[in-house]
Image: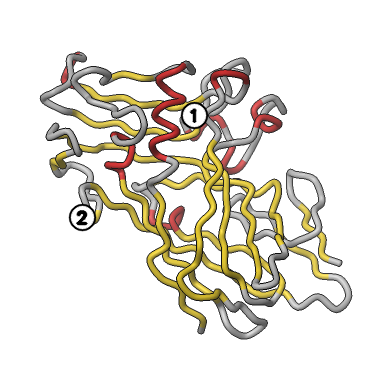
Amino acid sequence: MVKIRCLWATVGLAIMTLAGCQPELEGNVNAATLRLNITHQAGGKPMAPGTPVTNPHGETYTLSIFNYYLSNFYLVDTRGTRYDFKDSYFLVKESETASKLIELKVPAGRYTKLGFLIGVDSIRNVSGVQTGALDPSEGMFWTWSSGYIMAKMEATSPNSNQPAQKVEYHIGGFSGANNTLQWVELDLPSAAEPTGTAISTVALGAEANEWFTGAVPLRIADHANITSPGPLAVQVAANYANMFAVTGVTNQ
């Protein structure tokens, strides 16, 4: 049996989070480490805030902020068994290198799929004051009625009609027609095989330009400011759900 003591509920699998939770192993548990190493790209190149990028519509933008929440991870092993890591919340920021390295304590095994939620689930949006990655001081929270900003992109662009050519996409909304929560499941190109002595690392890439493509293309000239829940936010969330790709797996 594995227990975890932190600000959240006790769960059945230990989760190592940036918020400082400490796992407690009881009995004969073979805990292993799965590491996610996240890199960001913009226009197919390593993200470099302050450097102009061209989106799929030929519009130029210069990023300044690129943040998003990842939560509720799960793994699927070679037998098809799913292991859920509920109550796992991470705030990933391009400006903070440490935030792009996530470690999960998992049972030793062979895993072929990785899943997670982009955003913060509805329960945490209405659970009162949070700490750690969910602390409102992180700048990713509106009000108790509107909840968390699931993902945030800020930039400037000559195509923007906003003051100072600002581009602001603060995407949130967690209920009803305004629900922007997005589940992602990714196949691993080769099995992740964490053991008690070997750490598995999944290299995960995220492409900013995916925010602008999808069923409903997002053009800066049309919408340079989306900063409240609503249909536009839902459309953008559906776009950025496709920004992730697994680029490699190592076991060592």
Question: Taking 207 as reference, is 120 above or below it?
Answer: above
Q: Nearer the viewer, residue 73 or 14?
A: 73
Identified by mark 2, the residue type is Lys
Counting from the top left corner in percent of width and height, residue 126 is at 69, 24
Horizontal side, residue 71 vs residue 66: left or right: right
Q: Give the structural element (helix, strand or loop) at label 1.
A: strand
Residue appearing at x 29%, y 34% in the figure: 212
Horizontal side, residue 43 vs residue 232: left or right: left
Instruction: Looking at the image, tell me whether mark 1 or mark 2 is earlier in sequence order.
Output: 2
In contact (CB < 8 Å): disc 1 and disc 2 = no
Quadrant (top left/top right/bottom left/bottom right) for the N terminus:
bottom right
Residue appearing at x 61%, y 15% in the figure: 145
Residue under numbered circle 2: 45
Name the mark nearer the viewer: 1 or 2.
Answer: 2
Counting from the top left corner in percent of width and height, residue 96 is at 39, 50
Q: Nearer the viewer, residue 107 or 81?
A: 81
Residue at the limit of the structure toward the front, as seen here: 215
Residue appearing at x 40%, y 45% in the figure: 242
Few, some or many C-alpha atoms within 10 Å of disc 2 (few <14, some 14-19, many ≥20)?
Answer: few
Counting from the top left corner in percent of width and height, residue 66 is at 35, 40
Q: Nearer the viewer, residue 151 or 164?
A: 151
Counting from the top left corner in percent of width and height, residue 97 is at 38, 56
Question: Taking 73 as reference, is 222 above or below it?
Answer: above
Identified by mark 1, the residue type is Ile
Residue appearing at x 24%, y 31% in the figure: 155
Q: Give the structural element (helix, strand or loop) at label 2.
A: strand
Question: Taking 100 as reference, is 198 above or below it?
Answer: below
Question: Taking 89 as reference, is 159 above or below it?
Answer: above
Q: CA distance from mark 1 to mark 2?
A: 26 Å
Few, some or many C-alpha atoms within 10 Å of disc 1 (few <14, some 14-19, many ≥20)?
Answer: many
| Tag shown at residue 149 | 1
